Image (cartoon, coloured by chain):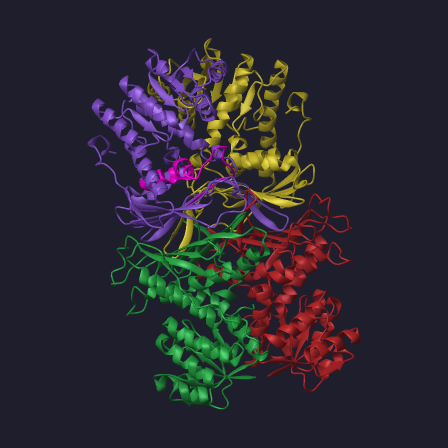
Chain colours: A green, B yellow, C red, D purple
Amino acid sequence: MLKIGVIGCGAIGREHIRRLTNLVPGAVVVACSDYWRKSAEETAGQYGIQNVYDTGEELIAAKDVEAIVITSSDSSHAAYVLESLKHGKYVFCEKPLAQKSSDCEKIIAEEIKHGRRLIQVGFMRRYDRGYAEMKRIIESGELGAPLMIHACHRNVSQTDGFQTEMGITNVAIHELDICRWLLGDEYKNAQVLKVRQSARSTKGYDNPQIVLLETSGGCRIDVEVQVADAYGYDIQCQVVCEQGTIDLPDPSAVVKRANAARSFPILTDWADRFIEAYDIELTEWMQAVGKEKLTGPSSWDGYAACVAADTLNRSRGTNRFLEIEMIGKPDLYQAR
Amino acid sequence: MLKIGVIGCGAIGREHIRRLTNLVPGAVVVACSDYWRKSAEETAGQYGIQNVYDTGEELIAAKDVEAIVITSSDSSHAAYVLESLKHGKYVFCEKPLAQKSSDCEKIIAEEIKHGRRLIQVGFMRRYDRGYAEMKRIIESGELGAPLMIHACHRNVSQTDGFQTEMGITNVAIHELDICRWLLGDEYKNAQVLKVRQSARSTKGYDNPQIVLLETSGGCRIDVEVQVADAYGYDIQCQVVCEQGTIDLPDPSAVVKRANAARSFPILTDWADRFIEAYDIELTEWMQAVGKEKLTGPSSWDGYAACVAADTLNRSRGTNRFLEIEMIGKPDLYQAR
Amino acid sequence: MLKIGVIGCGAIGREHIRRLTNLVPGAVVVACSDYWRKSAEETAGQYGIQNVYDTGEELIAAKDVEAIVITSSDSSHAAYVLESLKHGKYVFCEKPLAQKSSDCEKIIAEEIKHGRRLIQVGFMRRYDRGYAEMKRIIESGELGAPLMIHACHRNVSQTDGFQTEMGITNVAIHELDICRWLLGDEYKNAQVLKVRQSARSTKGYDNPQIVLLETSGGCRIDVEVQVADAYGYDIQCQVVCEQGTIDLPDPSAVVKRANAARSFPILTDWADRFIEAYDIELTEWMQAVGKEKLTGPSSWDGYAACVAADTLNRSRGTNRFLEIEMIGKPDLYQAR
Amino acid sequence: MLKIGVIGCGAIGREHIRRLTNLVPGAVVVACSDYWRKSAEETAGQYGIQNVYDTGEELIAAKDVEAIVITSSDSSHAAYVLESLKHGKYVFCEKPLAQKSSDCEKIIAEEIKHGRRLIQVGFMRRYDRGYAEMKRIIESGELGAPLMIHACHRNVSQTDGFQTEMGITNVAIHELDICRWLLGDEYKNAQVLKVRQSARSTKGYDNPQIVLLETSGGCRIDVEVQVADAYGYDIQCQVVCEQGTIDLPDPSAVVKRANAARSFPILTDWADRFIEAYDIELTEWMQAVGKEKLTGPSSWDGYAACVAADTLNRSRGTNRFLEIEMIGKPDLYQAR
């Protein structure tokens, strides 16, 4: 059994603890911590976790903690990852890896010193069966090279305090990762466009926004981002290849014919949409840690998404494509 | 221009007059009649029809009437068809050809005397693009021989006076024709089943019913018949062949995503569903009359549907398959 | 951890052992046996199972075996279930529970003596998310009462030795269970129809067949059964309610547009179709055993499917509906 | 009967002559001309057209020609339209109205002198039932204001001599018209993007291209343009409104299940895709001419599409949005 410590006992933290406890074979959560100690204690009581620590640093240092799951607030991720690296422990860090690309670069530099990957970033969509099948088809070459991606990311609501920039760093961030992954390519330039605003969006942030990206290989990507007030939580993705297109499937749903319409439901909660992907993600991470060979999204992937997001946010209002500037890709992240 | 007389100026009669006048090239309606003379006069006024006759017989006999369209009440069809045959004039008769199979046999006998087809029956579904494409695929042999048909016929409402037997003779009659046509085969036996009745159906007739048929070639057909109170007017048909299945397409419709559902509308009025088929049906009939070579549904087709409907209605409550007994198929109807 | 012994190490047995070992929390397989001892030994080696027994009886009697999974040949199920009941141990028995309804009755009589359910039958479709959602909608009443079910069960191939009757007892048996479950009703009569045979089916058994059923409540069910040679493994089910219909969803699949067609793949292997249902089935069984309160398919459900299958096979060639005769439902199986 | 003269007897010209002769009530083609006189003579022979003229100018001037249909080469459109205006005759001009926006402005100026609309431009998509229903839904307001359009225009092949700029002026031109029409808005700026080129496109022109547009109201439009070598002729259009989205329907098609796939065909010939729209377009134009009140796409619409196309072609390679500059909209084109 791998002994895991979880930093951050909010919604996603508790959900991961439930998953590790009930569904993922070979995992046991032995420690947790939270900014609000009471939250950590309640969670520990609910899931029979032995130790509650006052700080993430103490949890990371604890002898019996073999691997760390970071589900704390976004701004704290980078520091906990760096601290974990000091102890040479495996880390599963929810996205984003860091809020500044310079922090990502620091993490990469420290990880390289270990000579092997210790960090996985929580881009769970790579574990969704639909995206995985799309990647399989693209790489099979049966439809020729990919040329374009048309994507949509539509949400029902956001928590208080949401800001325009978060439409990129917290929402479109998933597309920033999944498009790179599907295409096996890096971004060259990017631009965010303001769109006629929805009358339903009155909370002070831009909604919708459109993200445009070009890759090194010349592929073009457009992503419609409705951060809130959409008809449901709906994720769409079409990859256009030389000889055909492939679409991300809608979640399986019962089709109803009633009231003079044929219909099927669309989810409204993002947590339902990728629930199976989360299960597979943590199961595969556990297995990879067991074999001491991580294969999931890396620090480099966290960095690439972070740089693209920064560039997009800087482009807002400029009405032009800005170059995306990244450091050279270290050898550690070259192999698949 | 072919000069046409129309007997029966009810809803379907006026609709056909509008179609012949505005849409079908080469046709002109020169005469009409109706049980209610006033109705015929109003229709004549609206469409500029020269002559109104007191009776169908007078209209049939009129010198300038070259072809007859019969859209009067069901019970009057057979007599008008026989009268038209006396004058050797072309007839387009709305379904049913007759209400008794013995009347159909009389019509067939009279038509044979003319040595060529003079009668076409209004089974318009054969002119629907979806059914036509299904027949093309079946006959191409690309999916092997047809083995089964699963069909549904769902209606929103019926006019007053509707009775259980009419669920077969007026509703399922379309499937009785189209299945024979798709399969190129005759029926061997048939059975109608009573089903748990919809609580919404309180008007004294059976609803729903299920029709089961077997063809001479051993194909099995099941038809769900909801004569009223369904969620819409919905016609479905799947032909199962040895190597695959084909489905009748739903009418083309805009797909909407809203209110946490993906949906498209289903029609509620039967007249909308096959409107294009009616247009093509009358246009092709006109062209066939022009060439003096009818190709559409024949008296034999009207007879076959009538015999099957009779047998089904006799089977009700017996819980068994009854043999379908038909006369031998005359040469006149052998060729396609 | 619940200690489980598995009788039968064929394909489905090994698959369940893999599932219990890798995916189902709280389960450990401690014993296995097989008619071919070598097969059991290989399986034990692969999954680290401690004890291999020469016979199912020895395995059932073993002290450390707390619950039994029966995945041996169909003809051996009933005897192993009865033997397990002697020891008062929980049993998960793959379908069929028994090959004769009299054996099912014996099992029921023995289980009743224990005063609580010990047996669950492997009707895994009840754990498929699609069927579960259909049942939820039916029971919600939002579409009114169910009136009819139209279903299809199409297979690619069968193993050697397959016979006509097995089209019911081994193939349609799943529909016999799932339709009862969806409708919450028992069967009243049944009939199997022979259909024009596929030219591709030359192995001596009927293919396709059509199953017709009527429930006590008057619902009608038709099931097309292609036991082999179909275009894929395709399971379809439509429940027609008073106010609308619901369809079993197709498995989620990437839609491709290429070569002048829009398409998505259909599975060809049944094991892929319900893989998630199997996972959920065994996980929920484990949890129910832990709570000492079985909720899955019962001996009664195994009996009901067996009686219906027997009646269908007796009806073949009679061209009529035969009454389905069952014993009264014992109290033990009344509660949900 | 309206007496029509057709200038240009190529593929589209002959198709319109067939349509006017066989399908459109009230029309008769009395004259035709073509750059290749022989082509005009053959066409006249085939359709029984009385007069063949050496030049379009002679045809326009002919006494018995009441209305003109222009289906000659693109570069000749503007001159024939201006010539027709001199004679005050009604014109149906295939798109484009002119190749330079300055020519469109001349036409507008001349038409205004007549004080009423004489010209209709052949943007047939407005007569497609799918687009018409989309416009109806948008204008109903049931989904709130439109915010974005995502569209695709994919072609199988182009004739020899095709050039990059024609991807806009001859292909995307349809989207340039239909998006304005759907949104009821004018364009503010535009940009065309080069994309990773398909290895299948080796004929010297850009393929694919992406068109980006912003309207005065702030709506954003993206159009993927594959001018050739796509998997079929496929037109897709999604309008995203505040409360939901609507999709242009695929053409109705028989769904096939075979060879382990569910599929339906995609058209490959553009002429099949909008054949019904062409029929409706000419029928409604005839009726409008009869009432002396044109309602279809106007000179202004031809001008707006032309200016947008010009701007897009100028933007190629600039990597930025260029302003779209139009003259003020004359009163003549204000009313709907």
Q: Quadrant of residue D138?
A: top left
- Front one among B70 and A273: A273
Res A102 seen here: yes
Q: Is residue D154 magenta?
A: yes
Q: Residue furthest front?
A: A328
* Count of numbered tags: 0
- Front one among A157 and D116: D116
Report the side of C106 relative to B135 (left or right): right
Q: Is residue A4 above or below residue D71?
A: below
Residue at 46% across, 45% down: D208
Residue at 43% across, 11% down: D50
Residue at 43% across, 34% down: B271
- Front one among B205 and A185: A185
Residue bounds of the magenta highlight:
D152-180
Res C240 seen here: no
Q: Is residue D211 above or below residue A126?
A: above
Q: Is residue C218 above or below residue C136?
A: above
Query: How far across and how far down the image is residue C289, in percent?
Result: 58, 79
Residue at 58% across, 77% down: C286
- The quarter of the image holding the N terminus of chain C is bottom right
Q: Is residue D166 magenta?
A: yes
Report the side of A130 relative to D85 (left or right): right
Query: How far across and how far down the image is residue B303, in percent?
Result: 60, 28
Q: Is residue C224 above or below residue C83?
A: above
Query: How far across and how far down the image is residue A281, in percent?
Result: 51, 71
Query: How far across and how far down the image is residue C324, in percent?
Result: 65, 58
